[in-house]
Amino acid sequence: MRVWLRTYGCRANQADTEQLRGALVARGATLVSEARDADVAVFNSCAVTAEAEADLRQGVRRAARERAGLASVVMGCAAALDRGTIATLPGVSAVVAGGNVAGVLAALDLPAKPAGRGLAAGAQSGVRALLRIQDGCAEHCTFCATTMARGAHRSRDAGAVVAEAASLAAWHPEVVITGTHVGHYGRETGTTLGALVARLVREVPGVRFRLTSVEATEVDPELAALLRHDSMRVAPHLHAPLQSGSDAVLRRMGRHWYRAASYARAVEALVRHAPVFALGADVIAGFPGETEADHRETVGLLEALPFTYLHVFPYSARPGTAATRLGAPVEPAEAARRAAELRAIGERKAAAWAAVRAGGRADVVVTGTGRSCTGLTEDYLTVSFADPAPRRGMRVAARLAPGAGGRLEAVTDAPGMPVAAMTAEAMPAPDSVPAPA
């Protein structure tokens, strides 16, 4: 069986796809990089925005045109929330809710138990491995469909997380800790995210860990210390969802655990005195009921805080969420204008941070190959390499210099530190979507 994998959405989805990839190969399937070469396609869907669902439908239709007789399975969040429309798309043979890998295997008529060894233990398709530590969410943000799709919060056993991390560390220079609401890790068992990360650092040597989104007010003291003082092991990088700088809008969003001032205090305390620190945020523009005054409060907060990048999205109504019942939405053109203004702030701050970092030192994981070889620094900067570039999968010490097109260039001091056999030749073949950098 030849299988093509296509992933939409967040790193939690990407982690599910990596788990599925290993399960498929262990059962004798062959992974291909183009839909036209496949017998079966598996689409891992996203439901965060209407655009994400439209992309899914377009992708399924395109694949059906490219390969006559292609059978498609759709999994993920959009599949979990679907009311029968996905099954009507051309070639769709099964719809499997959420990240149910066993359900996908059953839909493909593959055995529950693997027939062979499959990929080398711990190997994923990207240079930076994904480690899921929890799933689901206990909160109920009024704009978010993820809780409906992913279910209630549940943490993975810490021992299982550490064992998987050790396996990943044999192949990957960086492990990205991911989940749906990572900051709630361990709440049902009396532990914390900081305690887990400290154990990972202690028991899994050599690899660099990085966190995905964590609420700013959920960074506990142990985690804060690791983020500030152990950059070789824990990347000094926090992506802290903000969504709005207006307290009135935050209340309407159902984000009850912080206000603009408490968010600002949390990130300022974390970044203060840190010589190198990446700070990012998600922001929604044009939420129902957002006034121009609310928008100006968001602008002011973004300008005041030391962000190094921003992810900005116009509000997208999701069926079944409470936000659709909060009154008239902001006009699309106005929401787009506000989003553009916020993106411009993010672009200015990103350029300013790159200028600060020019001439400084960096710990770079090499993520690309060939003439366009790129790498990722500890503070989430994408940098280029001059020829001859280090091999993909290496981790190198470098000096950052101004480069072409505004991107920094990494000038290496030494050949680099290869991590096991993690080279372009030894890595598993990626799927048709570039693995997360």
Image (cartoon, rainbow, N blue to C red):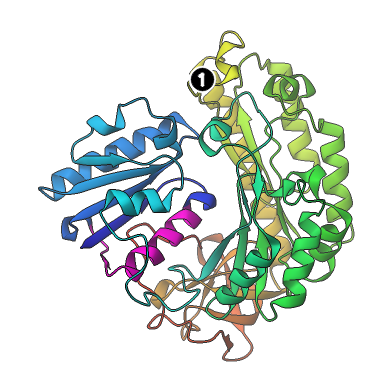
Can you tell which quarter of the image residue 93 is in?
top left
**Magenta-drawn stretch, dominant element (helix, strand or loop):** helix
Q: Quadrant of the N terminus?
A: bottom left
Query: Based on the displayed image, in which of its 4 quarters is residue 143 positioned?
Result: top right
Residue drawn 64% across the image and 88% down it: 413
Q: How many marks?
A: 1
In depth, the one of 110 and 353 nearer the eye is 110
Q: Position of residue 238 (x, y in %)?
A: 72, 54
Q: Is residue 232 left or right of residue 287?
A: right
- Give the residue furthest to the bottom: 414
Q: Residues within 10 Å of mark 1 (few under 14, many from 20)?
A: some
Q: Residue furthest top?
A: 327
Give the image location of residue 148, x and y in percent: 54, 31
Check disc 1 and report the residue beneath it.
320
**Regarding mark 1 in the picture, which secondary structure is present there?**
loop
- Quadrant of res 433: bottom left
Q: Residue at x 36, y 68 (%)?
A: 114
**Where 63 falls versus 133 (above or below)?**
above
Residue at left offset 56%, top offset 81%: 170
Would you place residue 44 above or below residue 261 in this image?
below
Q: Residue at left 21%, top 43%? A: 62
Question: Magenta stretch: residue 307 in it?
Answer: no
Tell me if residue 204 can be seen.
yes
- Residues 32 and 388: in front is 32
228 w.r.t. 305: above or below: below
Over which residues does the magenta segment extend?
Answer: 14-34
Can residue 402 be seen here? The reply is no
x and y percentages locating residue 288 in the rendered image: 61, 16
Tell me residue 156's x, y (percent).
64, 55
Amino acid found under the numbered disc labelled 1: Gly
Whether residue 20 is in magenta: the answer is yes
